[in-house]
Amino acid sequence: MKLLPSLIVCFAPSIVAAPIPKADEIAIENLAGKWVVADTKPGAVETSMQFTKNKKVTLVGDLAGAPITLRGTYVLKNDQLKLSIEFGDNANEQKFRIAKLTKTELKLIDARNVAQSFRREVSTKK
């Protein structure tokens, strides 16, 4: 019976000291590129976001059945993504949490806790 407390005391420091993945490992280089909404319906205007390494963002979306392009900037801090999008004379800020970011998939959670999935568009230019 005395063996169990001894094992806990011996292994507790290694459990506490184990490395925990940090959210701040999301780098701008991983976000940079063009991301397209993963579940675009056939015939719909393709909605996309394009991030650059110099913290610029371009959004392409649907406005009454016609494509619209908006530009702005972004700030990436840990797993938090803040977009500042210009629309005429106004700027609109939106905050997201990055739930998943791989080479091919991006999942954002908005302030209302609604998830949106994107897939990376691979350039075919040579």
Image (cartoon, helix red, strand yellow):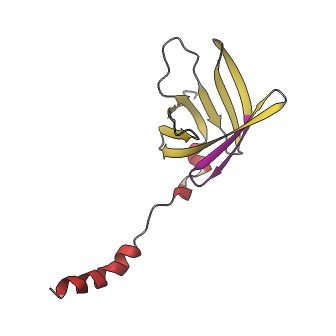
Q: Nearer the viewer, residue 46 or 91?
A: 91
Instruction: Verify whether residue 79 appears in magenta.
Output: yes
Q: On screen, 50 above or below 11?
A: above
Q: Nearer the viewer, residue 21 or 104?
A: 21
Q: On screen, 71 above or below 62?
A: below
Q: Tell me which corner region of the image, top left, top right, bottom left or bottom right, holds residue 60.
A: top right
Q: State the quadrant of the C terminus.
A: top right
Left or right of residue 42, residue 49 in this image: right
**Residue at 59% of width from left, 33% of height from top?**
34
Outermost residue, right side: 89
Magenta portion: prevailing SS class: strand
Q: Which residues are magenta?
A: 72-84
**Residue at 18% of width from left, 88% of height from top?**
2
Left or right of residue 51, residue 86 in this image: right
Left or right of residue 71, residue 102 in this image: left
Left or right of residue 5, residue 87 in this image: right
Image spot of residue 44 (x, y percent): 55, 14
Number of callouts: 0
**Residue at 50% of width from left, 60% of height from top?**
22
Instruction: Verify whether residue 99 appears in magenta.
Output: no
Image spot of residue 15 (x, y percent): 35, 74
Image spot of residue 46 (x, y percent): 57, 20
Q: State the quadrant of the N terminus.
A: bottom left
